[in-house]
Image (tube, rainbow, N blue to C red):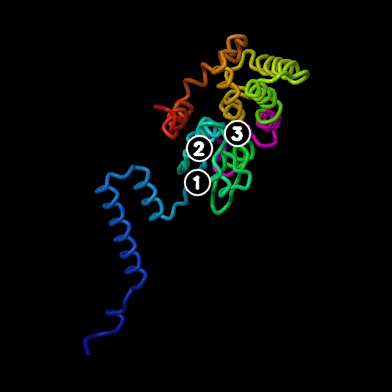
């Protein structure tokens, strides 16, 4: 007898781990051989390490860019699944309905949960991954202001901008909507501009979810040329342009937009 049988006991956990490692490395080699994108290889490594990535379902030329910025600020692992607007209607593709019944973007998937609506996504990501970053102190007056602006960005602020867009695309004569949209837009932007007087950020002295959510309004004003009429918003916009994660989000948006040459 050559000693204890324990000496020859098979460690199935080690064999399984070695087998999984071999499979992962073979897949990585195939990615390298076939010149697949870095993101593909990075995802494989994360899967091997047991790290779950957040998936952002991103529509080109949409408010989803704000969520890219937020994810960059939080420094979490994520991947972008890009969708393209219809070239004629500018509507989102039906494939987004497989993610969420409304077929809109942004939508995120995280730990088996699907979260829609920009404001809800922003609040969820900051609460889950922020560790105190990009947030006002809990139960403070500033926290209430942050929540107010996050919801303002998708409600009061967006309505007149959308109305202006719909009126322009409709092209027909209207008796009520044009004047109403202009009046509401002037009121909303005047309020936004006044609240930025003497400030770098909208709430407090540091970046919060408020600034990320309101950035789409700022970009809309830039694109339309209206920003010149609102000096505080224009100065605020110039400050946003100095933030590295903001610029990276813009670059990633362009990278995933098939209409950008």
Tag 2 residue: 71
Give the image quarter of residue 186: top right
Residues in magenta? Answer: 128-152
For label 2, the SS is helix
Percent across and percent down for residue 121 are 60, 40
- Alpha-carbon distance for marks 1 and 3? 20 Å
Please tell me the numbered disc located at residue 54.
1
Closer to us: mark 1 or mark 3?
Answer: 1
Q: Residue furthest right?
A: 176
For label 1, the SS is strand
- Vertical comparison of 16 with 73: above or below: below
Q: Quadrant of the C terminus?
A: top left
Q: Residue at x 58, y 51 (%)?
A: 113
Q: Are marks 2 and 3 in contact (CB under 8 Å)?
A: no
234 falls in the magenta region: no
Towards the viewer: 130 or 123: 123
Task: Report the side of 163 relative to 200 (left or right).
Answer: right
Tag 3 residue: 135
129 falls in the magenta region: yes
Towards the viewer: 139 or 64: 64
For label 3, the SS is loop
Q: Residue furthest bottom?
A: 1
- Vertical comparison of 30 with 139: above or below: below
Tell me which numbered mark, 2 or 3, is placed earlier along the sequence.
Answer: 2
Please tell me the numbered disc located at residue 189.
none
Tell me which numbered mark, 1 or 2, is placed earlier along the sequence.
Answer: 1
Task: Report the side of 231 relative to 6 (left or right).
Answer: right
Tell me which numbered mark, 1 or 3, is placed earlier along the sequence.
Answer: 1
Give the image quarter of residue 180: top right
Q: Residue furthest left?
A: 2
- Alpha-carbon distance for marks 1 and 2? 9 Å
Percent across and percent down for residue 216 are 58, 26
């Amino acid at each position: 007898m050559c000693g204890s049988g324990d000496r020859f006991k098979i460690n199935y956990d080690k064999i399984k781990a070695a087998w999984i490692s071999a499979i992962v490395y073979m897949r990585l080699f195939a990615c390298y051989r076939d010149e697949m994108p870095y993101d593909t290889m990075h995802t494989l490594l994360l899967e091997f390490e047991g790290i779950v990535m957040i998936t952002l379902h991103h529509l080109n030329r949409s408010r989803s860019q704000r969520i890219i910025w937020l994810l960059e600020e939080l420094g979490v692992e994520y991947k972008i699944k890009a969708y393209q607007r219809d070239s004629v209607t500018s509507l989102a593709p039906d494939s987004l309905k497989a993610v969420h019944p409304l077929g809109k973007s942004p939508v995120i998937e995280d730990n088996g949960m699907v979260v829609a609506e920009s404001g809800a996504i922003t609040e969820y990501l900051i609460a889950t991954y922020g560790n105190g970053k990009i947030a006002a102190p809990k139960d403070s007056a500033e926290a209430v202001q942050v929540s107010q602006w996050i919801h303002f960005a998708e409600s009061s602020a967006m309505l007149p901008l959308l109305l202006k867009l719909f009126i322009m695309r409709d092209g027909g004569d209207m008796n009520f909507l044009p004047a109403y949209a202009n009046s509401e837009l002037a009121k909303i932007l005047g309020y936004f501009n006044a609240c930025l007087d003497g400030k770098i950020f909208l709430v407090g002295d540091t970046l919060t979810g408020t600034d990320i959510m309101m950035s789409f309004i700022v970009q809309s004003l830039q694109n339309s040329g209206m920003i010149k009429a609102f000096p505080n918003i224009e100065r605020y916009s110039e400050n946003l342009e100095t933030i590295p994660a903001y610029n990276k989000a813009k670059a990633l948006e362009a990278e995933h937009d098939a209409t950008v040459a």
